[in-house]
Structure formats: C-alpha cells, structure tokens
Amino acid sequence: MFGLEALELARIQFAFTVSFHILFPAITIGLASYLAVLEGLWLKTHNDVYRDLYHFWSKIFAVNFGMGVVSGLVMAYQFGTNWSRFSDFAGAVTGPLLTYEVLTAFFLEAGFLGVMLFGWNRVGRGLHFFSTLMVALGTLVSTFWILASNSWMQTPQGHEIIDGRVVPADWLMIIFNPSFPYRLMHMATAAFVATAFFVGASAAWHLLRGRDNPAVRKMLSMAMWMALIVAPVQAVIGDFHGLNTLKHQPAKIAAIEGHWENVPGEPTPLILFGIPDMQAETTRYKLEIPALGSLILTHSLDKQVPALKEFPAADRPNSTIVFWSFRVMVGLGFLMIFVGLWSLWLRRGGKLYSCKPFLYLALWMGPSGLIAVLAGWFTTEIGRQPWVVYGLMRTSEGVSNHSTLQLSLTLVIFVVVYFALFGTGLGYMMRLVRKGPHTGEGDSQPPGGPGQQRTPARPLSAADDSADANTDAVSLNKEA
C-alpha cells in the first residue's frame, strides 16, 4: 500500500487508533472534574446556574465517555494482534499495569457512573456528589496507570531481562520511572486546558449568536479562569519535562531542536523554524537565535545540547516530524496563554462577554487544546523511535509477522469505520453543544436536585431537531 512496508503500516494503524482515542480521554478527564466542581458549587451556593450547567455538560460527558471506552478497547487489542513480539517481550510489565487500570480506575468509573448520570432524583445529594467525585477520581487514576505504562517504555527501569523477556524486579521503580511524574502532570494538565478551551468555545458560540444568559456567561468565565491559571502552569511543567527528556532521551531533544552538530566552545542556538533533512543531515532554511538553545535546555550559556550527529544514524528519531509537531504544541500553548491574559484584561474592563474579536478567537481556539495534545503525543512517540522500549527493544523487533496486504486491508477498514462511527458520535455531541444549557426558562421540568422528585437526567437525550439547529452555524460563519 503506497509502497509502505508491513512495519510502517502497523505503526500507522496504531498511530491512527491512538490519535482517535486520546481525544476522548482528554475531554473526559477535564469534564469529569468540571462536573464535580459544578455540583460542589451548586450544593454550596444553591445557584441554579451551576445545576443547569451540570445537566448540560453531563450529557456531553456521557457521549464522550462512551466513545473513549470503545476506541480504547480497539487500541488495547492491537498489542496482541499487531505487536505480539513486543507483548511477549514486555508483557510482564505492561500487562499488569493495564490490568491495574481496569481493576481500579475502570471499575471505579463504572461503579459510580450510573448513579452520577441517572440518579439525580434517586439518591441523596451527598451520595450523588460523592459519585461525581469518584468518577472524576477514576479518570485521573486511569491516567496514572496508562502514563505509568507508557513512561516505562520511554525510561525503563526496575526490571531484569531473563531468557529474552522483561521480568519485573521492583514495581515501585517500574511505576515511578524517571519520566513518569513529568509526563503524568503534563498530560493531566493538558486535559484540563483542552477542556477549558472546549467549554470556552461553546460559550463564545452562544454569545456570538446573541444567546446571552447567566449560564453561558458562567461557562465562559470559568473556562477563561482555568485558561489563565493552568496554561502558564503547563508551560512550566513542559520546561521541567524537557530537562528530564534531555537527561534520559537526548536523541529525542536533538531531533526536536533540529540540531545536527555543535561548534566547539560555542553554546547551542535555538532554531525557531526550518526544515530538517534526514538524508542530508542538516536543517534547511533555518532561522536561529544564538545561545538560546543552551539557555532554555540547560539553563546556562556555556553548556551544549547534544546534536543528532553524535548518535548513530539508525538511532535517530525522525526530526522532520517531531521538529514541527513540537512547535505546533508550543505555539498553541503561547496562544492559549495570550487568550487567558486577554480575558483578564477584558474582565477588568467589563467587556469579557461583549468583545466580538475575543469571542471569535475563543471560538476558533476550541479545538486548540486537542490539537496540542495530538502534537505533543506525536512528539513523544515518534521521538522515541526507533525504540518501542527505549534502549531495550527496537520497534522493528516488536511487530507481528503480518503481510503488507493484511495490514493494508485492516488499515482501510479502520479508517472507514472510525470516521463513520466516531464521526457520527462527534456530530451528535456537537448538536448537544449547539443546543446549549437549559436555564429553567420555559423548561418543562421543575427545578430540583438529588433527592428531589424530578425526571432523571438522561445523558443521551437527543438535542432538539429544530430547523435552526444547523442554520445557526451557517449564519455565524457568515457573520465571521
């Protein structure tokens, strides 16, 4: 298929399924915590705006959670189908870690999800709030175990190799491997940032339509506070993560920087833009700032950053890809910080909900967090190549013995089914977003809460099929 070998097709297939899957947990993690905050604020203040927002976002959470579970199951099966040699080599470590995720996080989420979604008038307020907290905790616990497994593949330790297989020697060292704390914080924070901009874009869309009400204003306000606080924190975490990567995976950093060789006695420049050429071993058309690479990556002006030519050609990641995926992630990060600061300035002037240029920017920034997550994931995983377990097993050694025809056929099937299935799910979720939160005005259901008589919140209730459900988006584009 397109002149690709079986190994390349297996990698593309796994990258495709992971890229689809990671979008759903990123929003699920953030929305679960957001729902917990909303219900907690409603219980404390008795402000019905928080209750209305809870009902609105719980529907979107339910759809997103379901798609995440389905896409995650498909991804897990590929370890045995397409990467059986890797599973045979490292399964004694990765298998138990993924099992712990099921036994703790998934059971915790499944046990309380029904109460959270359907028990609004069936259980007391305390139990319902506790259920929401447990679902939010479950998403974070799931992140813990998944990142522990993946981080061990990046910086393996706590194991022995006996008869060609990895054997666990110290589970604490395996779980808390050198890159795990940084990658866990980076991913969890990325999920909160992505959710903040998703929520903020939803609010901006309704405000631009002229639907200005307390619930929509609260959505935008909370989202921008989150962006203002968390986006700069993410930049700091990213800096620490970069220093850790430089220590344990220097070839990845060299590829990210597009840096091929050092000049003796001179600090390393920072290449802002360019086109890394893996064949010619150079970065073409580069725009660089002298000494800034050393300052950022070593926090000094005299230390040099390792260069790609210091590593054998067979051990170099594809700099052409990770050079740009990293810059997409960082560029969006700085833009997120700018949006947060602009929102603070507008808030102080009382124009946060009426400044159209800002609202349009917030709207277009809606998918920015998810794009940044994907770009960061590409940087991490492609930057680990050519290793599937860094320094222990090459990717070419971990793939199953499948033919090019088999992998081509299954890849085509995956693409068609995923776009049809998850495209429908995403379309349905956006219909719910377009519908917007109920504000109690004209709502046939009486106000209530956990423990009160009220029709249970139905997370998969369809959005209204009114004629203006689609025309609103068209009219908004015309206004833009």
Image: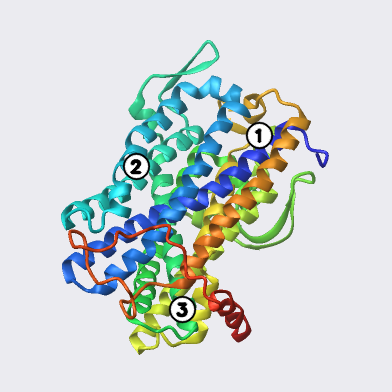
63 and 193: which one is in front? 63
Residue drawn 41% across and 76% down? 341
Crowding around mark 3 (Cα neighbors within 10 Å: few <14, some 14 to 19, many 20+) is many
Return the residue found at the far right.
3
Element carrying mark 3: helix
From the image, which quarter does the N terminus lie in?
A: top right
State whether residue 306 appears in this view.
no
Q: Secondary structure at mark 1?
A: helix
Q: Is residue 240 left or right of residue 477?
A: left
Give 438 or 46, whichever is nearer the viewer: 438
Measured along the vertical axis of the image, is residue 351 above or below residue 397?
A: below
**Residue 206 bears which disc, if any?**
3
Instruction: List x then y, in percent, for residue 131.
Output: 25, 50
Q: Which residue lies under the disc numbered 1?
A: 315
Q: Which image quarter: residue 473?
A: bottom right
Q: Give the spatial CA distance, label 3 vs label 2.
A: 33 Å
Query: Disc 1 and disc 3: Cα gap in Å?
Result: 50 Å
**Mark 2, residue position:** 110
Which kind of residue does numbered mark 1 sit on? Asp
Label 1 vs 3, first from the N-terminus: 3
Q: Secondary structure at mark 2?
A: helix
**Residue 452: x percent and y percent?**
18, 62
Q: What amino acid is at disc 3?
A: His
Can you tell which of label 1 and label 3 is closer to the viewer?
3
> Which residue is at the front of the view, 381 or 286?
381
Where residue 343 sits in the image (x, y, percent)?
Answer: 41, 78
Q: Is 415 left or right of 337, judged from the image as shown?
A: right
Binning the other alpha carbons within 10 Å of mark 1 as few (below 14), some (14 to 19) or many (20 upward) gives some
